Image (cartoon, helix red, strand yellow):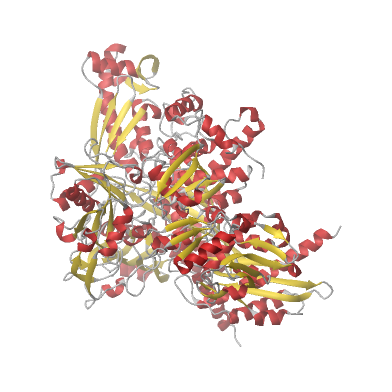
Amino acid sequence: MIDVTIVVNGETRRASVPPETTLLKLLRENFALTGAKLGCDVGDCGACTVIVDGMAVNSCLMLAGQVNGRNVTTIEGLATRDRLHPIQKAFEDTGALQCGFCGPGAIMATKALFDENSDPNVKDIRDALSGSLCRCTGYTKMIEAVQEAARVLRSESRNSSHTRELKVTAP
Amino acid sequence: MKAFGYVAAKDVGHAVALLGEYGARAKLLAGGTDLLVELKFAAHGPEIIIDISRVDELKDISISDEGLRIGALVTHTEIIRSPIIGNLFPALADAAHSIGAAQTRNLGTLGGNLITCVPSMDSGPTLMALDAQVTSASRSGLSQVPLADLFVAPRKTSLQSDELLTGIIIPKANFAKPAAFQKFGLRKGQALALVNAAAAFWIDQDKDSFVQPRIALGAVAPTVIRAPRAEAFLEGKAITDEVMAEAGRIAATEAKPISDFRASADYRRDLVAVLTKRALQSAYARASNKVRESVP
Amino acid sequence: MKRRGRGVACMWYPIGFTVDANPSAATVKVNEDGTATVLTGTVETGQGSLTVLGQIAAEALGIATDDVHVVSADTDTTPMDTGAIASRTTYVTGNAIWLAAEAAKAILFETAAPMLGVKASQLEAKDRKIQVKNYPQRAVAIGEVAHRSQVVLGQPAIGSASWNPPTVAMDPETGQGKPFATYVYATQIAEVDVDDETGEVEILRICAAHDCGTAINPMLVEGQVEGGISMGVGMALQEEMLFDANGRHVNPNLTNYIMPTSLDMPQIEVDIVQGYDPTGPFGAKGVGEPTAVPTAAAILNAVHDAVGVRITSLPATSERILTAIKAKRAGERKQIPA
Amino acid sequence: MNDDTKVLEREQLDLAETLRRSDVDLRLPAVVPREPFPIEPLTVDARQQTHAVGQRATRLDGRLHGLGQTKYIDDLSFPGMLYARIKRAGIASARIKRIDTSAAEAIPGVMAVLTGSEIPVNSFGPTFQDQPVLADPIVRHAGDGVAAVAAVTEQIANEALEKIVVEYEPLPAVLDPVAAMREDSPKVHAPNSNIYASKVVRKGDIEKGFAESDRIFEARFSTQMIEHVSLEPHAAIADWDANGRLTIWATIGRITLARADMARTLKLPMSRIRIIGTIVGGNFGGKNEISQEPALALLSKKTGRPVKGVFTRNEEFTSTTTRHPIIMDYKTGVTKEGRILARQIRLVLDGGAYCSWSATTLGKACILSPGPYKIDNLVAEAFVVYTNKTMTGAMRGFGAPQVCFAYESQMDDIAKALGKDPLEIRLLNAFDEGSPSPTGQVLHSVVIKESLRKAADRFGWEPRS
């Protein structure tokens, strides 16, 4: 067994797990954070995407030991006490998710995109979503949702006194 | 996954010591994008995983007297975002961008990609076309060999079981050498290369001809290979579309592709001709743009 | 070089099972405050069927989608339903829910008639009220009526109903018969670039015009069309399960089974064809499956238009297309007299 | 800790509060539109409109999807729950001579092992009950299950699978559907013929139609085997309680049929079975019948504990239904103006190892194969045959995408040969309101021509000379 201590969604969590435990399993089984999904277990589908130290990763492809001491944000860490995250709201409003299974991964991939690029064009968005396979939507409304969320976030960062939880850094 | 032990290496010295201790019984974990997939399907796990993902000395991109050094643990995303690489070798960034998707590029490392030694790796051809050297460390010290010598056979490198790949060096002589990378896959996102190709050459500005041309091909032989006959054909030739197309045709005869469920050998040869030509054209266009930009 | 082409394909597609009974039953309960609960045995598998079914119940009761809660998919508590198959949910389950809502509404009308001093047949449910037709000033809140029905008159406004699409068996010799109650129609047009050196197809855009009768929820209809097209793209160019000579799977994983990513999908422009089917709930038919039907044909017709080769075997991988282009060129060379 | 997480820590997510406040934020007061349906979106919140039909109402499950709070099967767990895995044959055609599970059962943490002989009625299927829950003794495709294990962890269950020893007597396999139609072909379900269903639609006089045609076009088209690739794999939890009542949470789009199949395979009265369909992470026809559920139920009965089974992505390909490959021969006679006078069609569907929804697919493919066109003389025949491959079944379109590929490809070939615009030739032949269908049905609410014109307008389709 190995001991891991990670900061998940701002909260320090500890667990003692077998070394072969993946980050995905650690989140789902040890920390009861079931938002990240297991869709293929080999990094093809992206349903398990979470953000580790600011970077979107396939949590099925990381060992728990690898994230020891690092900072992890999952889909459960996006909404605040006050409101849905603008990405979540845009995905809801545009009907960007159908069965929803790829949703948490696609939303986290979008979050990572915005952290790097607050004004992505359609090509950037397609590139950022290419690691999140979706069988329901043809990605069309998902791309609309990302554009909509980007607009909202940019206008919020212009009126930054109203911005609560999200920091959008220029590329 | 089968059970295994786990130890995190603190630095290169520690990693080398651990490798010396465990040798073939250990597996190195860098980005993990290939290793974890392998472990999930493996009948037997390794005795121990040596996690080198925290070894910061292997994460640098820097310029020294020797040339450009890229640490083995530099991720594909870091290559894409590096201003130094973007300036000197945009083809390397293109190759890195063609790998997997954002999630895997954020995890996967240059060293990890090279060490898989699969013929379709996307990091190999451009580096080989730029005469890159690989550096490694073991208990017996440091060593440096041409990248081509690293690749022995599919999934087999020349590294010993106690040897750690530490990075690559692109010689200073090749700085800003015009180069381009081309890849063809079965789809645009998350594509595995059916064929990839890289070209690099200097341009004799007076004659507008090829100088020291290099062509490297992936997924068409047991390892990434050079196309020496196509290179010899180009040397000194005036740069024309017909010459570049002919070089592609020659390169196609040098490829030794296999037929598999992804594509036939014939089709891969066709792609070698096209991608080689396009890599040459693209490198030339890139060089011409640069010249134009530099003219006030 | 890249050669551009365009291709059209149209299709027809039936709603519901082939001849066989595929009924749905439903229960609609109007609560004392005028909101409603719907019980259905169908399952939400991503299409948005529960949302659409809620809208149908809401429309029938003159209340809003948010006023309706849909309980689904539990054999202990929800009524029989043939399920999420054959593009039948909106049409068949929708009709059952509409009928159940009408039954519940009839109870409300009976209660409201004396409250408003008119006959039940003169009432309608609208804007969360039970009101006199063509005289909306005379109205009483639906909640007030529902409360009175249940608490004063002891007649809770609950309706149950079932529906099965009418069909006529097919003659075994000739196949003549009425296998389905209704059909939908659609056209898709694809624009592509084909690289004549590699055979690679880039789909630039797909325009899709789909009939679904009344679109109960246009946003969800568009979502179905866009998703169906992505399956059509995969079928046209990429996807294939492969077996070796011994019948073992060659590519049973998402690394080697190639399906479209966001980078492989074109711009999609969806139009909903104005339609109304009197046999469907509020004129609706269905839309789930037909969205995936014409896409491959449209794409392959566009490839034909671009480079003049007819691919007859799917998927039209870049290799198959290049092989066909080379064969066509060889044929053309042969035809030139020496 | 960076700034983001500090903020997050300060504002620890309180779900109820989030939703309450966001409701207040997001929902606008009701506004009643005057327009009749269907109407375009007028207001921010379509869910509050009392003309509910025609509104772009957001999905009622959309918010939970976005928050990662939708509970799919794999997100559920129960006290004492075990994890099941199924051993797959990995051989396309064989007789099982012996299964030795003793080494697997000896592994600490393995709670139960199940083989086909223990299943009360080891067959199911929506049309023909020809599919076993676990093969016994004949394996008909490489993805057939041969044994199931329940263990305290998935890792132990996987280890147990490797310890199960199965001895096979290999049998000849047939993979090609045309070869499978021959009398001397190996029989997938011996002694029955491999051709397990057929359908025919006939109308008018096909010979006369061809005789009157100016041009006749013939072509063969074929399509491939396709997997649904729902992002959520097939998953279920079975709980056989002490009252002898079975509860199944499952990714199934048809709970009524699922209950009937469970009652049959387990010989249980329906009143003792409860099927709960959770929100399913994609179906597309792939989740319209049971798969592992009877095995999970019996493992739960054996152990007295709830048992969860989630297919691997590999099993999604090898052991669930797929789309039928179809070989399609089309012969079409037309006038020089391009009007279709006669069409003869022959379809051979690769049915895989079990029937599943093949009979339905066969019927729909056959009826739809002439296309949405007025054709007076036609013959369409369709056959579905067993092969030793993954079973083909329901998938979005039930054979329609395949035949549409054929009839619309040939339509363009006809247009090109006659020098007609592809749009024009379709408008010439397409159904009108009241047209008879290939089965003689009088069609109503027909808008095929409207759809052709609308798509053409959107695209900007101009006839080319």
Observer-nearest residue: C274 or B33? B33
Q: Please indicate, yes or no, whether residue C297 appears anywhere in the rendered image.
A: no
Which of the pair D252/D104 is nearer the observer? Answer: D104
Q: Is residue D178 left or right of residue A50?
A: left
Residue situated furthest bottom in the rendering: C338
Is residue A116 positioned above or below C302 on the image? above
Residue most extreme to the right: B296
Q: Residue at x 62, y 72 (%)?
A: B147
Does residue D233 appear in the picture of this structure? yes
**Residue at position x 69%, y 61% in the image:** B90
Q: Is residue B273 left or right of residue C55?
A: right
Image spot of residue C329 (x, y percent): 56, 77
- Could you tell whether B241 is left or right of B57 in the image? right
The quarter holding residue C119 reads: top left
Which part of the image, by quadrant, shows the C terminus of chain A? Answer: top right
As displayed, is residue D233 above or below residue C115? below
Position of residue B125 measured from the top left corner of the image (x, y, whole percent): 62, 70
